[in-house]
Structures are given as C-alpha cells and as structure tokens.
Amino acid sequence: MRNHPVYIDNDPQTEPSTLNLGPTHPATHGVFQNVLQLDGERIISGVSTIGYIHRAFEKIAEHRPYYQITPLTDRLNYCSSPINNMGWHMTVEKLLGIELPKRVDYLRVIIMELARITDHIICNGILGVDTGAFSGFLYMMEYREAVYEIYEEICGSRLTTNIGRIGGFERNFNSIAFAKLRKFLKEFPPVLKEFEALFNRNRIFIDRTRDVAAVTVENALNYSWSGPILRAAGVDYDVRVMNPYSSYEDFDFEVPVGTNGDVYNRFLVRNEEMWQSMRIIEQALEKIEKEPSDIFHADVPDFYLPPKEDVYNNMEALIYHFKIVMGEIPAPKTEVYHSVEGANGELGFYLVSDGGRSPYRLHFRRPSFINYQMYAPMSRGMLLSDAIINMSSLNVIAGELDA
C-alpha cells in the first residue's frame, strides 16, 4: 500500500468531506457502500456497509430440501455459479457417502475451470476499464459468451446455471458441447495473449497498479483471505491442491503465486490462472476419452432423479421423483464441511443434518464476504482513484456479501 502522510487542519474551513461510494455508484461493482472521509482526494478513513441485497439464503436453505437448495447457490457468485453448484452437490455427497465415477469428476472439473476462466475474464477486463482501457474488456467478453454457449448445451442455462445433480449430471454431454469446448480451447489462447500484451507491460497500466494496495502475508492471513488475492500476496494456498476434490490430484498444473499482493500482482495471478485452467481442461478431455462414455452420474437411485421420460410414463418413477425433490428420503444425522476453490477463494459449506428433509443448519463460507472486510482499513491514505482499482482487483461480488 502506498504510504502517505494524512493530516487534517483544525480550521473548520478544511473539515474532511464525506463521500458515499455506493450503493449505486458504478465503480462499486455491486450493491454495497463505503462511507469515506476525504481530505481532498485522499482517504482518511472509511466504513464498509452491506445488506442492500440481503436475501436470507442461509435461512431459506434451512427450510428447503437438499435438491431445492442448488438454485440458491447460483445467486452467490453469479459470475462463476457452476462452481457454487458443484461445491454444494459435493457437500451433500459427502453427507450421504456417495462415491462418484472418475468420468463424472472430470466432467465437473471441466465445468468448474470454465467458470473460473469466465470469472477472471470479468475481473481483469473490468480492472482494465477502471484504469481507462475499455477495448480489452469488450474483446474478452466475447469468449465469456462462448463459455455460456457451452453451459447452454449442457444444462440449458447461462448465468444462473443450476447445473449438475447430486451424484453427477442430469444428462450426458452431447457432441455439440464437446465441439464448442474444443473450439474455445483453440480460439481463446491467442486472445488471452493479446490481452496480456495490451496490459502486462503497458506503462500507464503498470503505473496505475504497481504498489497500489500492496498487502503483506501477515495481514492477508490475519483477515483470512483466500484465492487469487492471497496467492498474489505470496501464499501458496489452493484448495484444489491442499484438499483435493473431484480427482484434482490426477491433474498436473501449477499454482501461480505473486510477491507483494498489490493490484498488479492480482492481475497477473488471475491471468496465469486462466492459462492453468485451460491446461487442466485439456487434461480432463484426454482422461474422459479413456472412460466409458455413457457414465455421467453415480449409481444412487435413492438420491438421483429418474429420467424425465420415465417420470412422464411410469408411476413408480414419478413417485420417486417426488420423494427425492421433496426430501422424503432420510439423511444421516451428522455434520460435514466441504470446500472448493472458488474463483475468489475458498468457498465452503458447513452442513448440520438432524436427519430431516432439510438442513438443521447450513452456513456458506463466501470468499468475497471475508476478503471484503479489509477494504476500508487498507484504503486509509489512498487516493480515491487508487481505492477504485483496489476494489476492482478484489473482485467483490455483492451476491456473496449477505446470507
């Protein structure tokens, strides 16, 4: 963080001014607010306020059967909602003791890494916009749309995907989905190279981002940071490596790590993570070719929805469909915690089951909520323009702030 002397004259004519950065200011990237005290253009102090889109989704989840909670997870980080969906399904599978076939794990890895790419496209693209470069964002967004088309082939949705099921996927990936995936893997790397060429050594961009909002390892850990912003500070922590899930231990990839945790390092880490995600997806495609192509879910008839054709034509399948969706099949009395590496950090689900149709208690560990707590303290002494790009680089998603 740039250290500047902060002082206030006792003259009442030079009292600090108050600026409400949000909840409707376009630079806030969501519906939240920072009440800042300014001495000219420099921030003296600030208070972060949240709650403008409070939806009580933890309490709602405690009154819904397990299958009906998946759409709630879409509304957390809506820039990478498939990761939320998969993380929730894995939590329930952990509760129920369900083991998945390797092919299902690999299919999930593909979806989650595509979601990571789209999230980083948005974050780094908007960081460019906030530093004055609009064209890079527009260019990259075309490829977020390409990923959304892949989602459409798999589940029929784009933004709030509700993708997958407890035990796997609703349907197998079709040939069109794989064709669009391979097209993306072929066309996106040259575009990412151009994007990096536009920013990585751009003198204006470097001057705006280097040494801005630098964070020490100690402060990052004290505030329980995780994800790209923690790795940008120099901490080699990634849930995919430390606590592998979905067979991530079968993949060869690197975890990008920065040095001083400034805005520039966060930008570079996210760019490199996109390269690593493509590397993982390519490996997953190779592994899928060695697995039986007709497997897309685990053999758990008590919790996996029967095919729609059977539901429409068979009374027993209709009854089972109703029992599963409405939570009529008992769950074990226990508690579990499962976390995945979300696009912004560790996304965790703490689930307490009393054996009923709904969770007794369900807590979402939302990475943006935790990462955001440091924003106001770290903004002290910054210029307002630096605080804006600091917010961009944190990639705070308002949907993750309130439970």
Image (tube, rainbow, N blue to C red):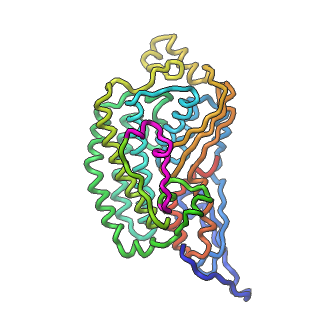
Looking at the image, the residue that sits furthest to the top is: 315
**Which of these two is toward me, 346 or 257?**
257
Question: What residue sits 60% from the left and 38% below the top?
Answer: 337
| Position in image of residue 272 (x %, y %) | 37, 56
Q: Is residue 217 magenta?
A: no
Q: Total of numbered circles in the picture? A: 0
Tell me if I can see residue 90 in this picture.
yes
Question: What residue sits 63% from the left and 35% below the top?
Answer: 351
**Which of these two is toward me, 397 or 87?**
87
| Position in image of residue 40 (x %, y %) | 60, 81
* Image position of 296 (left or right of 237): left
For residue 364, which quarter of the picture? top right
Tell me if I can see residue 63 in this picture.
no
In the picture shown, does residue 147 fall above or below 325? below
Specify the segment rendered in magenta: 232-250
In the picture shown, does residue 362 fall above or below 4? above
**Which of these two is toward me, 204 or 325?**
204
For residue 383, which quarter of the picture? bottom right
Question: What residue sits 44% from the left and 62% below the top?
Answer: 258
* Image position of 26 (left or right of 135): right
Question: What residue sits 43% from the left and 38% below the top?
Answer: 157
| Position in image of residue 126 (x %, y %) | 44, 61
| Position in image of residue 359 (x %, y %) | 65, 32
Q: Quadrant of the N terminus?
A: bottom right
In the picture shown, does residue 338 fall above or below 211? above
For residue 13, which quarter of the picture? bottom right
